[in-house]
Image (spheres, grey):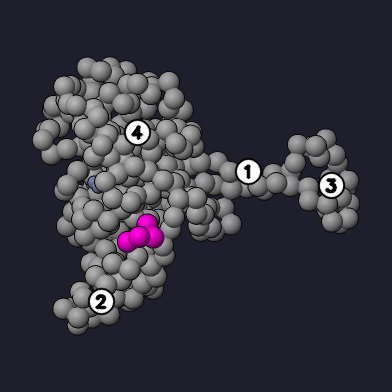
Amino acid sequence: MLDNMPFRTLAHKGCTIEGYSRAAVQTYWRIPELKLGFDLGGQPWDFMGTPTWFVTHAHLDHVAALPVYIARRRMMKMPPPTIYLPEHALETVQQLLRVISRLDRGRLPCELKPLAAGDEVPLSRELVVTAHATRHTVPSLGYIVWERRNKLKEEYRQLSGPEIRDLRLSGREVSEERRLPVLAYLGDSSPEGLDNCPAMYQAQILIAEMTFVAPGHRKEKIHKHGHMHLDDFLERRERFQNERIIASHFSTRYDDRQIRHYVKKLLPDLLDDRLHLWL
Ligand SMILES: [Zn+2]
Ligand SMILES: [Zn+2]
């Protein structure tokens, strides 16, 4: 292992969250079990094996490592990765890759796929990712990873195996798809991004941003710049149904001690110990 960039780890129900996120520094996350990652502000050497990425927005601290990642995979003879990104950024990122390719004299093979709010990306039979509008200073998307299963419809639950089989053979659709939000990733956003997407509050794991924590900040200004404050979490504490809530993307104006101090003062129970400060 080559330790080129920091990240920390949290395991929950068969998912390992690995990531790092500080505002204006760098943001990157991945979940090895789901074979996907979010944002490419940096790229730990170890993350290279993850083949599918979802970029929330084109601020440099969320995309700067995009060409680096593609080039590393080519160098290591891995298949070209698939990178989903907000549609408005597609052409410019393609231009960027062409320029870097010229400078570096190396190809950058990848599949760039544009997404808009409301789009769905089926990753496998069991997994689908949906894109959601968030509110930031540039066009941005949040993402939810759903586990989907085919379940027998309610009205057929009491039937026997052979009866169900006969119905199925007669062409009747006896099952329906059920979706469970496993993980939600907000990216950079004002609270609107959460409030407009109830599934973010229901996902087993929510990775959110909490850029500001100190009291006395003007909240309208923070929201206008597309970010969240600790107070926003307090105001919404009854809405979070998540089993784990990760608060990240803290501003560099705070050190770890200050962040813990402000959060513990306002949320002493850390939302029933579900809140994890990603420091
Ligand atoms: Zn950011
Ligand atoms: Zn940003």
The reply to whether discs 3 and 1 touch (Cβ–Cβ < 8 Å) is: no
Which residue is labeled 1 in the image? 178
Question: Which of the marked residues, 1 or 2, is nearer the chain's N terminus?
Answer: 2
Q: Amino acid at mark 1?
A: Arg
Which circle marks residue 164 in the picture?
A: 3
Q: Residues within 10 Å of mark 4 (few under 14, many from 20)?
A: many
Question: Which of the marked residues, 3 or 1, is nearer the chain's N terminus?
Answer: 3
Name the residue rendered at 39%, 32% in the picture: 244
Which residue is labeled 4 in the image? 191
Q: Which residues are magenta?
A: 84-89
* 164 w.r.t. 93: above or below: above
Q: Residues within 10 Å of mark 1 (few under 14, many from 20)?
A: few
Q: Is residue 35 left or right of residue 2?
A: right
Q: Secondary structure at mark 1?
A: strand
How far apart, in angstroms, are the residues tagged by discs 3 and 1?
Answer: 19 Å
Q: Position of residue 127 (x, y in %)?
A: 53, 52
Question: Which of the marked residues, 4 or 3, is nearer the chain's N terminus?
Answer: 3
How far apart, in angstroms, are the residues tagged by discs 2 and 4?
Answer: 36 Å
Question: Which of the marked residues, 2 or 3, is nearer the chain's N terminus?
Answer: 2
Query: Is the CB of mark 1 within 8 Å of ligand 1?
Result: no
* 59 w.r.t. 218: above or below: below
How far apart, in angstroms, are the residues tagged by discs 2 and 3?
Answer: 56 Å
Name the residue rendered at 51%, 41% in the picture: 181
Q: Amino acid at mark 3?
A: Ile
Count the numbered circles shown.
4
Q: Is residue 216 left or right of residue 277?
A: left
The reply to whether discs 4 and 3 touch (Cβ–Cβ < 8 Å) is: no
Which residue is labeled 2 in the image? 98
Q: Residues within 10 Å of mark 2 (few under 14, many from 20)?
A: some
Q: Amino acid at mark 2?
A: Arg
